[in-house]
Amino acid sequence: MLEQSARFTFILLIAWIFSNNSVTLAQTASAVGTLLTQPRQFGDQLRGEEALIVVPENRTVAGSRNITVHYFRFPARKPSGKPPVFFLPGGPGEAITAAQISEGLQQKRYTKYAEMRAFNANRDIVIVNQRGNSHVPGIQNLPRMWFVQPGKRLEPLSFDQRGQRMSEGFQESLRICQNLQFDLKGYDILHLVDDIEAIRQAHGYEQIAFRGSSFGSQWALAYLQQYPQRVERMLLSGVEPLDFTYDSADGIWHVFQRVEAQVRASGNIPLPEAGLLGAVKAVITRLEKQPLRVRGQHPRSRKTTEIAIGADDVRYYLRQPVLNSRVHSRRMLELWPKLVLELYREDYQYLAAKIIDDRPELEDYNLLLTLIDNSLGISDKRLKKLENEEARRWLGNINLLYTATQAVTPTPTVSDAFRQFKTFETPVLFIHGTLDLATPIENAQEILTWFPNGHLITVEGGTHAANQHAASVDPRFLNYLTDFFNEANPKDAFPRIPARITLPPLQFQATGEPSLFSQLID
């Protein structure tokens, strides 16, 4: 598959050069709207094409150089005339590649690729990757990452100082891109919206439907804002409204409260009188008064060294995966109480090992994510609300990436009018987990009120990967989604789609031995 992708890129490069009569890819290339395609099939499951469409890098500048946007298109196995389903990757910065599609279709369990296969029975499937994404073939792809210098080993983490280092690292990346002649003003949410519109027009679709998760949902909502008459229906999960790019500390704190409620209900883990979140507050208050120096051990080399631990270190690692758990996993939350209680009992060995492992390393951040998210920005009204949330006292500035880079980001920022909620008659099915730390359930509950033809599946105990969680306990889950796309009137499917899917309780790891540190080094 990698050889096929490389060959595709080479063929496209040759086509690009010859169609342009040019010896350099940095000059203006073939006409806007040109399609460069090759057949692509994945067994008998998906058959169609992999393609690039030529678009301006910056549509607001006359004579802007051209770049390409990568996408797949799979015509319906039994054409029905129904609008195609556009799949939008998340991130920003994520992509759907040929290798991922091939591997995903081989899975017997539910995946988004199973959705593609199911919806493709009578609808075209179009997968649009974000412009500039270096994971997929294309011309003029952006550098993938930008880097931040680490803090000092014997100084506790300071969000303020880290923010300054982030600003400096991001500005250095901008200078590199300028030297490479990228016009970074073209890597914003509105250009992504118009890339979808260019593909729609190229294939003559009157209307389109959307399937998006996380940023993919936000991308779909942005298109709906610009071209509401073009959107037939939408299926969105882990939904992120347009003014909700910045995270809510209270929303994250509410997830932790739900975890504590499950701990109490289990009856298996003794809690201090202050409770689990009281323990969090006690640890942070203690370290605000007096940061510590702890002699810890590197988790792999086993070498010991002294490390500083402060309140912001705890704030940061409270929201990171524990041990070998994955981000957005339920296991991460099942281990979280043990982390909190060890810190409360002044056992810092696990945290020290993580800091020793992480602090000397450069931090890396996705460039495309930073540019696009900062183009969405935040309204003054919502920013004031987030700054006054009670949980900010305990979690700190959880939006440091944005506050450190927003002022120097070259992408233009959308208006408050673009971000604000408005009523849409578009049918939409939302899916959201109650333990989602990335996009709290309150996001979906609030936006649902603006969609009178909307329906929400609340996944009790689901994280940002609520789709997978729901499918693991309800074998009909994919049928619900297919019904939504098959019904002539989507609202007719809603009575057959549950409002709630409940997962089993979290299985928390008991306190005591083995400690997190001993599990880490083992």
Image (spheres, rainbow, N blue to C red):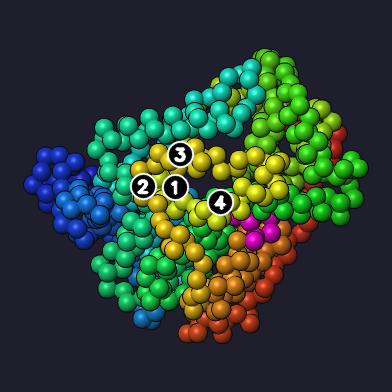
Q: Position of residue 360 (x, y in %)?
A: 56, 21
Tell me whether the residue at label 1 lies in contact with that at label 4, contact meaning CB atoms closer than 8 angstroms.
Answer: no
Dot 2 amino acid type: Thr
Magenta extent: 434-442
**Residue occupied by mark 1:** 374
**Residue occupied by mark 3:** 405
Tell me whether the residue at label 3 lies in contact with that at label 1, contact meaning CB atoms closer than 8 angstroms.
Answer: yes
The C terminus sits in image quarter? top right
Crowding near the residue tagged with mark 2, few <14, some 14–19, many ≥20 C-alpha atoms within 10 Å: many
Tell me whether the residue at label 2 lies in contact with that at label 4, contact meaning CB atoms closer than 8 angstroms.
Answer: no
Disc on res. 411:
2
Crowding near the residue tagged with mark 3, few <14, some 14–19, many ≥20 C-alpha atoms within 10 Å: many
Seen from the viewer's position, the closer of residues 451 and 508 is: 451
Kindly identify the residue that appears in the image at 51 percent across and 41 percent down.
403
Tell me whether the residue at label 2 lies in contact with that at label 1, contact meaning CB atoms closer than 8 angstroms.
Answer: yes
Label 2 or label 1, whichever comes before in sequence order: 1
Label 3 or label 1, whichever comes before in sequence order: 1
Q: Is residue 432 visible?
A: yes
Label 2 or label 4, whichever comes before in sequence order: 4
**Secondary structure type for disc 2:** loop
Dot 1 amino acid type: Asn
